[in-house]
Image (tube, helix red, strand yellow):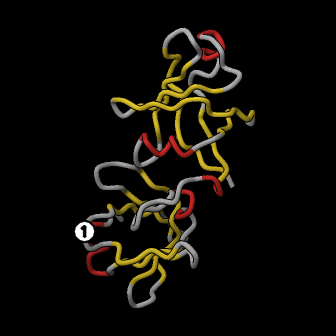
Amino acid sequence: MNLTVGLILKPQGIRGELKVKPYTDTAEDFSALSRVFVEGKEYKVLSVRTGGGAVYLGLRGVADRNAAELLRGKEIVIPREEAPKPAEGRYYIADLLGAEIVTEGGKVLGKLTDIRQAATDVYTLFDGTREVLFPVADGVVLSVDVEKGTIVVDEKRFFEVAVL
């Protein structure tokens, strides 16, 4: 499995550096990467610097502004096993999609199908007949078990905030 970790916004300067919008928790997460993939092609990471929430990458094989321009708008992907371990209580979206949403009493509410990132993330679950959106507000999600593929929610709090 691969993870998409950023979007190439534009060339930066004339030496092939790329300005990247990171999809990771912090731009500094890119410092741990030794290689990345763009449209299936592998690039060795030569340099990483951050500033203003952006990442500036130097990649082997992208030697000038013209080469960098060809990558504009493309996503940066890494193998899942090379991804930095997320901080305690944080998860990769790819690890959560498909998880079963259950109440603390064991009632199955549906499967997680989408996550919209915002100040408070909004999860979408499919219950077999419809989509239900709910914010991951205080007290809604009680626990996450990536290994078992389950997300336990407080039933009362869930139905207070869910958009049915």
Query: How busy is the neighbourhood of tag 1: few (under 14 within 10 Å), some, or many (20 plus)?
Result: few
State which quadrant residue 70 falls in: top right
For badge 1, the amino acid type reads Asp
The outermost residue toward the front is 46
Asked whether 138 or 13 is in front, the reply is 13
Quarter of the image where one finds residue 34: top right
Q: In the displayed structure, would residue 133 be above or below residue 143?
A: above
Q: Which residue is drawn at 40% across and 77% down?
A: 143
Give the x, y percent position of residue 129: 52, 68
Q: Mark 1 points at which residue?
A: 138
Residue, x 45% and y 30% (percent of image)? Answer: 49
| Percent coordinates x, y for residue 104 in the rendering | 38, 86
Above or below, comparing residue 7 to residue 153 in the picture: above
Direction bottom: furthest residue = 105
Depicted 146 relative to depicted 78: above or below? below
- Residue 114, image x, y percentages: 49, 56
Q: Residue at left 68%, top 33%?
A: 44
Q: How many marks are shown on the rendered structure?
A: 1
Q: Which residue is drawn at 38% across and 61% down?
A: 133
- Secondary element under disc 1, as helix, strand or loop, is loop
Task: State which quarter of the image contains the N terminus.
Answer: bottom right
In the current view of this chain or complex, which residue is farthest to the right? 41
